[in-house]
């Protein structure tokens, strides 16, 4: 009796936890089944079957989580799990199938069914996820030295971090077209720094032609440049914008181009964090994203890209908000699609007093818009500021109308507006928020479901009143649409006399009701 119970417990500890039937290869070579052995198990005589085929497990003891496959050499590049060869035939149907493991006595150990299989994705019994998809948790650090800054006011911080590195530079972006950034990366590579670059291969409208030039320069300098995309791409867009420079991490809302990190057009937010733990975490994210087959070397990807000419921003803007440096109480790095969605929702759901949001666009009925309405219904003061750029204006007009109508109908302290740059910048590219005057979120995540669930994004949530106040002041200026019409030279001449008074006044200004 005891022996039968022991065998039953042993079999119960063996489960099929995943199946990858369509691995984007000729003849589906490399397909595999993921099996978890909770207890070391002798699989002598065991078989694994699909609807029409059968393969035999090895005659040995297996433990932990493994991927079983009839083509182990190909499978090893498609899964992080140890690969175990099964002999015989196994052909998992892309149209749907049932996989079953049986003992030598034909006793069923476990089974898993699946429907039509998307390309290069794995079924876990509940959802399909891209092969190689990461599952990073949020990572937090306390008492963190950091600098918060905004664009176009202060474009110097990202390049300064690159220039100061002496060990490693991992730069991730949607695009890189900035000559200034490339110059700094090439100089670092020439000085012996380990420089690596990852950009997206899927860019709306095509890759900027200037990126071809910059990537060629980087590659010629010995920089490992990779392009994330192709048939086995894990993400719809590689949209993150960050750099790991030694033990410093710089996270931006802006692309590595003149209009963004160059400070020649966009209103954006950024943060430079000096913390070894957070830098190591983003370095691990970078290595995970460059270490999968969808991250193609520049030489292999270059001629497959569709290049487009793009105009180069050349605007000049006064510095109204110099950076603030502080010892923050806490900073948490979130990445999408792994955990950023949950992190942003938790931030909004726990707001008790105020939320201000600045975004390029919001869906009138999207999940984040709904979360903002819910916060207002709890009595939270909510302000939403969106871009008036022509390609966002129609959607954003609908969003602001809906939010303001909801506010009127329910008498909520909620208001939404379209930004009026008035010579302080050209367009809004911020993807940020300030909550309760104490916490701020900064990063690349556009607040929509697709970005949160399908893109690689990086955001930092900062718990610190000084940082929240800083971004809140920038938001208030954008909300008011205050005009700074002076030419840059004149503004600089006036700056000495008026800056202290302006900053002191700005700290005391409350939101207008409208």
Image: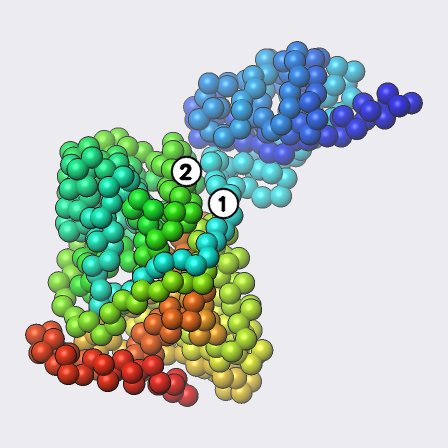
Q: Mark 1 points at which residue?
A: 136
Question: Colour scheme of this structure image?
Answer: rainbow
Residue 70 lies in quadrant? top right
Q: Nearer the viewer, residue 63 or 438?
A: 438
Q: Can residue 11 be seen in this view?
A: yes
Mark 1 residue crowding within 10 angstroms, few (<14) / some (14–19) / many (20+): some
Closer-to-camera residue (281/340): 281
- 145 is higher (above) or lower (below) than 92: below
Q: Position of residue 68 (x, y in %)?
A: 58, 22
Neighbor class of circle 2 (other Cα within 10 Å; few <14, some 14-19, many 20+) is: some
The quarter of the picture where residue 493 lies is bottom left
Given contact means CB atoms under 8 Å apart, are the residues at marks 2 and 1 in contact? yes
Q: In which quarter of the image is the N terminus?
A: top right
Residue at 62% x, 27% y: name it: 64
Label 1's element? loop
**Residue drawn at point x = 54 percent, y = 36 percent:** 122
Residue 350 in the image: x percent, y percent?
56, 69
- Disc 2 versus disc 1: distance between alpha carbons? 10 Å
Asked which secondary structure carries label 2, the reply is: helix
Tell me the quadrant of the picture where the C terminus can be found. bottom left
Residue identified by numbered label 2: 288
Residue 433 placement (x, y as % from top left): 41, 68
Can the viewer see residue 306 in this picture?
A: no
Give the residue at the far right of this rendering.
1
The x, y position of residue 387, in whole percent, is 32, 70
Horizontal side of 407 relative to 195 (left or right) equals right
């Amino acid at each position: 009796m005891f022996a039968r119970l022991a065998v039953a417990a042993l079999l119960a500890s063996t489960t099929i936890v995943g199946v990858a039937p369509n691995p984007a290869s000729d003849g589906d070579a490399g397909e595999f089944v993921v099996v978890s052995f909770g207890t070391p198990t002798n699989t002598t005589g065991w078989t694994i079957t699909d609807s029409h085929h059968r393969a035999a497990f090895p005659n040995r003891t297996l433990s932990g989580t493994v991927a079983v496959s009839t083509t182990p050499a190909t499978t090893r590049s498609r899964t992080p799990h140890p690969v175990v060869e099964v002999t015989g035939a196994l052909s998992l149907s892309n149209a749907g199938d049932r996989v079953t493991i049986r003992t030598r006595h034909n006793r069923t150990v476990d089974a898993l069914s699946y429907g039509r299989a998307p390309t290069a994705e794995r079924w876990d019994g509940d959802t399909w996820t891209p092969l190689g998809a990461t599952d990073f948790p949020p990572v937090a650090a306390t008492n963190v030295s950091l600098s918060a800054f905004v664009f176009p006011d202060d474009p110097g911080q990202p390049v300064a971090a690159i220039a100061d590195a002496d060990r490693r530079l991992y730069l991730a972006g949607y695009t890189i077209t900035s000559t200034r950034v490339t110059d700094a990366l090439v100089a670092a590579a020439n000085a012996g720094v380990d420089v690596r670059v990852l950009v997206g291969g899927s860019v709306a409208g095509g890759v900027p032609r200037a990126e071809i030039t910059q990537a060629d320069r980087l590659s010629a300098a010995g920089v490992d440049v990779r392009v994330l995309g192709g048939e086995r791409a894990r993400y719809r867009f590689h949209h993150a914008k960050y750099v790991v420079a030694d033990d410093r991490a710089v996270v931006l809302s802006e692309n590595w181009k003149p209009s963004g990190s160059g400070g020649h057009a966009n209103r954006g937010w950024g943060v430079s964090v000096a913390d070894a733990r957070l830098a190591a975490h983003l370095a691990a994210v970078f290595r995970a994203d460059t270490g999968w087959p969808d991250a193609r070397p520049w030489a292999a990807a270059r001629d497959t890209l569709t290049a487009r000419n793009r105009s180069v921003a050349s605007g000049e803007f006064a510095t109204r908000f110099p950076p603030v440096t502080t010892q923050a109480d806490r900073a948490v790095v979130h990445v999408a699609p792994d955990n950023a969605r949950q992190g942003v929702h938790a931030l909004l759901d726990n707001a008790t007093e105020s939320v201000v949001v600045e975004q390029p666009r919001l869906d009138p009925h999207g999940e984040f818009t709904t979360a903002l309405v819910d916060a207002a219904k709890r009595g939270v003061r909510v302000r939403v500021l969106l871009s008036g750029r022509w390609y966002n204006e129609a959607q954003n007009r609908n969003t602001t109308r809906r939010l303001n109508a909801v506010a009127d109908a329910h008498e909520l302290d909620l208001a939404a507006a379209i930004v009026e740059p008035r010579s302080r910048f050209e367009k809004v590219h911020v993807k940020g928020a300030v909550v309760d005057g104490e916490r701020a979120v900064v990063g690349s995540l556009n607040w929509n479901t697709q970005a949160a669930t399908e893109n690689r994004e990086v955001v930092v949530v900062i718990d610190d009143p000084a940082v929240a106040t800083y971004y809140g002041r920038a938001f208030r200026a954008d909300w008011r649409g205050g005009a700074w019409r002076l030419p840059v030279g004149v503004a600089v001449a006036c700056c000495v006399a008026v800056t202290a008074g302006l900053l002191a006044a700005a700290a005391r200004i409350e939101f207008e009701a409208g």
